[in-house]
Amino acid sequence: MNFSEVFKQSNQLCKVSPDGKYLATCVQYRLVIRDVNTLQILNLYTCLDQISHMEWSSDSLFILCAMYKRALVQVWSLEQPDWHCKIDEGSIGLVSSRWSPDGRHILNTTEFHLRITVWSLCTKAVSYIKYPKACQKGLDFSRDGCYMALAERRDCKDYVSIFVCDDWHLLRHFETETQDLSGLEWSPNGCVLAVWESCLEYKMSLYSLDGRLLSTYSAYEWSLGIKSVSWSPSSQFLAIGSFDEKVRILNHITWKKIAQFEHPAIIDNTKATVYKEIEKRPAVSSDEMSLHDITVASSLFSTQSKYDISPLPVQIPVVKPDPDRANPKIGVSALAFSSDSRYIATKNDNMATAVWVWDMQKLRLEAVLEQTSTIRCFQWDPRRPRLALCTGNSKLYLWSPGGCVSVQVPAEGGFQVHSLNWHCSGDSLILIGKDQLCLCYMDADQNNE
Amino acid sequence: MMPESSLVKDHYGISVKCGAPLLRHFNQSSLPLHGNTNAQSAFCTQQNVPECLSHINQEVSSLGLRTIWTELDESSDLNVVTVLNCMHDLIQLHRRSLRTLENMEVEQLKSSSKLDYLQLSTTRLKEQLECSKRENTGLLERERQLQQKVKSLQNCLKNEKEEMQKLQNMIASRATQYNHDMKRKERDLNKLKERLSQLLVDKKERKQAIDVLNNIGRADGKRSVWKTEKTEAKHEGEMYKTLLSDYDARQRDLVLENAELRRVLHQVKNDMVSLLRLKKLTQKGVQNERDGTQANSEEEQEEEGFEPGKELFSVHASEKLTNSIRLQWRRLKSHVEQLDSQVSLAQVNAGKSSETTPRETQEEEVDKLKLEIQEYKDLIQTQQHLLQHQLSSSCDEITSLRNDGYMLQEKERLRGEWKTLEGQRSIFERERKNFTEAAIRLSHERKAFEEDRATWLKHQFLSLSPCGDPKKLMLSNPTGASSTGETELNLQLTQEKLSEFLSDSASTPKYRSSSSLSTVDLHHALHATPENLLIKPKVKTTNTEESRNLWEDFPILQELSEP
């Protein structure tokens, strides 16, 4: 495992191009394009204001930089550095900006969600979409890029519009069964749209591509409901994490629950392994449970840590949420399927130091990773069943079915890993700190395991 | 008592009228007063008047009344006044006693009635008590039930309270969520209002604009198309195409899965059928008749099942398949249960076939089995003891232990048998010894007897002959006579001893049968011998010789015994 040197970044805007060749980072109002392997700066662009949002187009040719304060969007071309494009939303303001799947249209959401403006870079044409709903996830593109689903709210009712991304033709427009739609997501095969309610009611509705209601699922009434949703990459399962600390898995044939994963505070009577991170005071050599030799240049002030397998029963530390606050810190807030749909990783907010990994084949708990601090981010390797997670300290943690490893990120002055992103090939990781970033290159033999 | 008192009362009346004749009557013995005394001898007669008087005096004085006669009176005539007084007193006394008797009777009646009453009342009270006890238990039972009810209701109440608490918490969280959302919306609204007011005030309105250096081509390189109905239809078509392809793919997967599952089911069914067939082969005879019809139906089903490919898509076929599998499974289950029961029976019967037991020998078999069980239990116990012994002496291998145990057990048994044999042999030896002694004695005695007989015969002969030597005989006889007498005695003794021996021999075990026969024969022989000896003088010489070898020359004894 090799670590690159640390680079500056701002706003946690570091993205690898979809073809995996380039790394774009934003430093204040500059956009820096680097080669992923050599990390040499290939291009440097300057924007008019501090960049709030940056996104690669799907063909990796263009990058948009949005500056929300100034309601400006600037688009840069990789092939032609001289090419420029500037979209000014004017007085109406800008809340969010994104590419369309074909990489030639930009969708800007105005302030207060008054409308979505669709700018075409091919024809300079403008389209407007009225009444978009301001919710957690009101807009989603299907994976093949053909269709876009948009949540709308008119006359205190929820609607969903399905657009053909080719020419923005409105394919379907239907009212949903929801009282207050909170989010929608396409299944990876693009045939089913999952629509869920706000947390005040547990209700998951499933619509077919042509707008027919396939099924609704409601686990219970009255208590706070759905907190997180995730489709399995094979479109076979829909995982719903809720405020009652449980994950329910629905199957794509009957849309009924086939499994329920619970997160008890005391883990007992299970074949899963519980890994507990144990910190050691400064040690010269690290004796982690590593899969292979790691060359680590440890700094004097960092504490080494390793994983120990805890014998059952294990008690996970629970933090009781404040009952008087809205959006309590309880329930399953993060769900992620591995790329082969074999595993699902979950995080329960009142046990924020633990990541639970479940085996989807056997429908039971596979492993629990108990960390020393709250988990900030975890993501699966896009190629293999390997989970990377970070807890805001200077370590990177990796789990695979073979075992668990804790890696110290070598950086002078301490580098706090706040979030991470896998490279699309699964060979490297981008570790993003507060205003720094670092690349971690996995070894070739490790990848071959 | 009553009839006498009535008599007395009557005669009291009579006595008032006739006082003197009463006395006369009194003197006479035929007074009806003493009704009882007519049958008995009269108390007072002419002769014993003074004695009677004195007696009566005594009686009266003992009763505490004034005496009727004192010795001072010289006249033989009684003082009528005193007598009358006495009589009056007596009558009064009698009356009083009668009254007391009546009173007592009344009292007794009263008390008996009281007793009855008390008894009744006690029974009534007992019943009441029983009743009240029952009531009490009933009430206790009710109380218990009510308490239980109270407990359950309290539990319900607790549960309801908990639920209510939960609902309250839920409502509270919902309320906070609503409030939060409300506040957020209000904030948004306020922002919007501000913005609106700002825009209204603001003169410079920045319009939307896009500034592109040059138009870029489409991603796929094609030219953009106008939006027409055709394109719309095309989009619809494409959408349905995607949906259909997805459904197709899913259906294909399901078909493959179904085929796989069907194949697996077929395999399972075939395995079960083959298993059952194998097991049937091992149970011929009795079961063939029973399973004849079943086998036929099985074969039918097997024939049906041999066409999996054709019937893949018919619901009917799948139903048939599942039904046949269920049937096979049921058969397999029943078979396994049968085997289990058979195994348990076989263990009980210790190897005997449990199927072909005819009813006649069942009881015999049961008895035999019981015996066997007992034997095995004993065996097990001895083995256990041996094992424990071995374990205490820390032996390593279990099999050698077991073998040693068996060996030891065998040894024990053999030792026991040897002991019994030895005992019997010793007894046998003893008896033999006694017998030989007796026989020797007998032979001696016989010898003597023979000698005596010989001398006696000689004597006889000599006496018969003109010249005789009585002295010789006399000389020899006394010894002979005494010896004959002795021998006779001895013979008798030996006979007694022999009878004893015979009785002993009868009780000895069977393996001494050969010797017992000889003793019996010997007995017969010896019984017969005195007569034989007398009748057959010829054989006497051989007798004395052979009598020594009694045991050995068995056939000769037989000859002896023949008349």
Image (cartoon, rainbow, N blue to C red):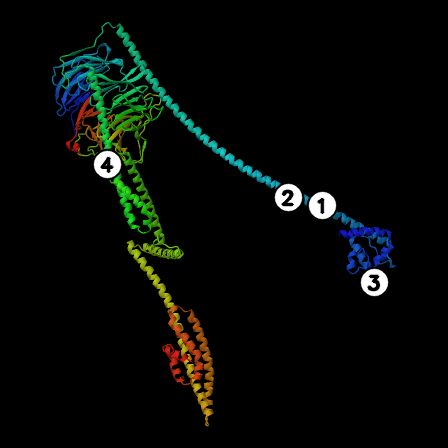
* Residue at which label 2 appears: B119
The tag earlier along the polypeptide, 4 or 3, is 3
Residue, disc 1:
B107
Q: What is the CA distance from the residue labelled 3 to the residue labelled 1?
A: 46 Å
- Of marks 2 and 1, the one in the foreground: 2
Q: Which numbered tag is attached to residue B310?
A: 4
Vertical placement of residue A402 versus A98, above or below: below
Q: Chain of mark 1?
A: B
B17 or A269: nearer the viewer: B17
A367 or B146: nearer the viewer: B146
Question: Chain under label 2?
Answer: B
Q: Secondary structure at mark 1?
A: helix
Which of the 4 image quadrants contains residue A137?
top left
Labels 3 and 2: the sequence-earlier one = 3
Query: Is there CB contact under 8 Å for labels 4 and 3?
Result: no
**Disc 4 residue type?**
Lys
Of mark 3 and mark 1, the one earlier in the sequence is 3
Check disc 3 and report the residue beneath it. B47
- The percent position of residue B410, horizontal first and vertical second, equals 33, 61
